[in-house]
Image (cartoon, rainbow, N blue to C red):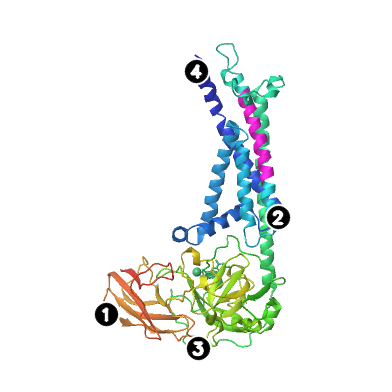
Amino acid sequence: MEGSAVAKVTGMRRRFWGWAAIGGIVSAGVFLAAAELVALVASREASPLLALGSVVIDAVPQPLKELAISTFGEYDKIALLVGLALAVLAAAAVAGVLQFIRPPLGVAVVVIAGGLSLAAALTRAEAGPAAALPALGGTAAGGVTLWWLVARVRRWAAAAVDAVPDERGSPSPARDGDPAERPTVHAKGATASPSVDRRAFLRVTAIAGASALIVGIGARALIDATSSSFAAVRKALRLPAPKSSVTVPAGAELDVPGISPLFTPNADFYRVDTALTVPSVDPATWRLVIDGMVEQRVELTFDDLVGMGLDEYAITLTCVSNEVGGPLVGNAMWLGVPVRDVLRKARPLAGADMVLSRSVDGFTASTPLPSLTDDGLDAILAVGMNGEPLPLEHGFPVRMVVPGLYGYVSATKWLTELKVTTFDADEAYWTPRGYSAKAPIRFSSRLDTPRTGEPVPAGRTALAGVAWAQTVGIEQVDVSIDDGRWQTATLSNPISDDTWVQWFFEWDATPGAHNIVVRATDKNGDVQIGERTPVAPDGSTGWHRTLIRVT
Ligand SMILES: Nc1nc2c(c(=O)[nH]1)N[C@H]1C(S)=C(S)[C@@H](COP(=O)(O)O)O[C@H]1N2
Ligand SMILES: [Mo]
């Protein structure tokens, strides 16, 4: 008899878990909104969700990261944020139920989440002491909201349980053993009806939820508007005309529909970085520090750098994560200053063999010193890209570009420091994460057109694409159709050995399925490696093979 009464009451209380979970979710919303509001006033870079996301980006092991990139492509960061938001939602619901079953366990979960956000925000490269404030504000607001809302649910539940007719006419069994379930207000007889607590809970939940949405979205929009104010600064920036410009020779660009343009428009240029939000750097306050193993520590302003005089450089950039035939390669006309001229001001000491370049967001790259100082190599600090100041997402206001090296060991965006050092003494961002400390680009070639799956009518068809061997140059590109003999393609007139060339081959396409393979030979006479290797630890190899259906 008594057992079934307990079960009945427990069942009734379970029905309130959903309300407690909603209280938890609304409290998480209040947490995040309060944090954004504090971030807006005190520390714009320290949004808890973004800080946690950045920690996840830095912590995720390399194979998982490759998986995320291959699954979500350039939406990998959005996927991460959505995943994180779902995790927060689930944790918040659990915190609500815990607070209902055994207070203050739910509030303890909020405090732990606050501690994690605090740690995440404070360990970011850009973080000052104020970065602690958003997490603290969020924890306080979220914790109080959870405590208050779930207390209402508990009273509502207790009142509802009391309203159940008691079969023995003695105190309800659920009220033995757990004094917390005996609301004091109720004991005093102030409320006797569950509907009063229900109304209080629903009203405050609705108000808190709506305010969280409005305040959170509003604060985030205002924070984002700050970065678009940097877009305005960038737009207003006038770079001086170059001292020297690149001559693009006649025949440098082939007229084949579907081929990669000789210069990749900025809007189409691939983007790879670990930054969850694009760092905002004001050129007016930007400084480049050259330090480490140098005779003289040097600090340059943006005007100092630009004042050294700008030259044009056509350099093809490549990412180590580019799979055979992949899109993570692009060619741009950069405007910049030779790194060697900048390093010379600081006079590197003998024994140094590496420059560790650092971004404002903490990213670092290890570049062999000779790749930056050799007179024959055009390593630059770039401020312009394809006739404009660097786009924000490509490193505004200053980045490195080094011909012949993969981006992760050379192309630091939002550059802030050049530390002259040694490979023995320092390690770059990707080195402990499964990639080589040194990584020259493995020369490669790609078929751009026709694409797999694109219907090709029989008859004369242009096979065309690009090939790159930065610092060495492409000598020849060959194609093989259905594993037949290699046939030499026609090359565009190269701008320089640092830029890709376009190639095309006229093919008389016959109906059916055909396998097209392309390979390059560089000016050293080396033939592109045919064997497939993965992108880690130092770049993929293999020939690009495409299956084409001719109709
Ligand atoms: N600050 C910063 N710079 C960075 C990176 C990064 O994660 N953070 N990624 C590098 C990598 S892996 C590549 S391939 C190039 C890509 O430059 P892009 O995004 O302008 O194409 O930037 C390099 N510079
Ligand atoms: Mo990269």
x%, y% of residue 435?
A: 46, 67
Which comes sooner in the sequence, label 3 or label 4? Answer: 4
Residue 255 vs residue 135, the one in the foreground? 135
Q: In the image, residue 384 lies at what x, y percent?
A: 61, 77
Q: Can residue 251 be seen in this view?
A: yes
Q: Is any part of residue 214 visible from this angle?
A: no
Task: Give the residue at x 58% y 41%.
Answer: 92
Task: Give the residue type at disc 3.
Answer: Pro
SS category of the residue bearing label 3: loop
Disc nearest the viewer among 2 and 3: 2
Residue 396, placed above or below residue 521? above
Q: Crowding at label 1, few (<14), some or many (≥20) Cα neighbours within 10 Å?
A: few
Counting residues from the N terminus, which is met first, the one under dot 2 or under dot 3?
A: 2
In the rendered structure, which segment of residues is drawn in magenta?
A: 139-158
Task: Provide residue 463's location: percent of width, then percent of height.
Answer: 37, 76
Q: Nearer the viewer, mark 3 or mark 4?
A: 4
Helix, strand or loop at mark 1: loop
Seen as rendered, the residue at the extreme top is: 169
Does label 4 point to a residue whose CB lies under 8 Å from ligand 1? no
The majority secondary structure of the magenta stretch comes to helix
Horizontally, residue 74 falls left or right of residue 169, namely left
Quadrant in which residue 514 is drawn: bottom left
As measured in the structure, the alpha-carbon distance from the residue carrying label 3 to the one carrying label 4 is: 91 Å
- The residue beneath circle 1 is 485
Dot 4: few (<14), some (14–19), or many (≥20) neighbours within 10 Å? few
* Residue 40 circle label: 2
Q: Residue 3 carries which label?
A: 4
**4 and 1 marks in contact (CB < 8 Å):** no
User: Toward which corner of the image does residue 207 lie, by quadrant?
Assistant: top right
Label of residue 249 in the image: 3
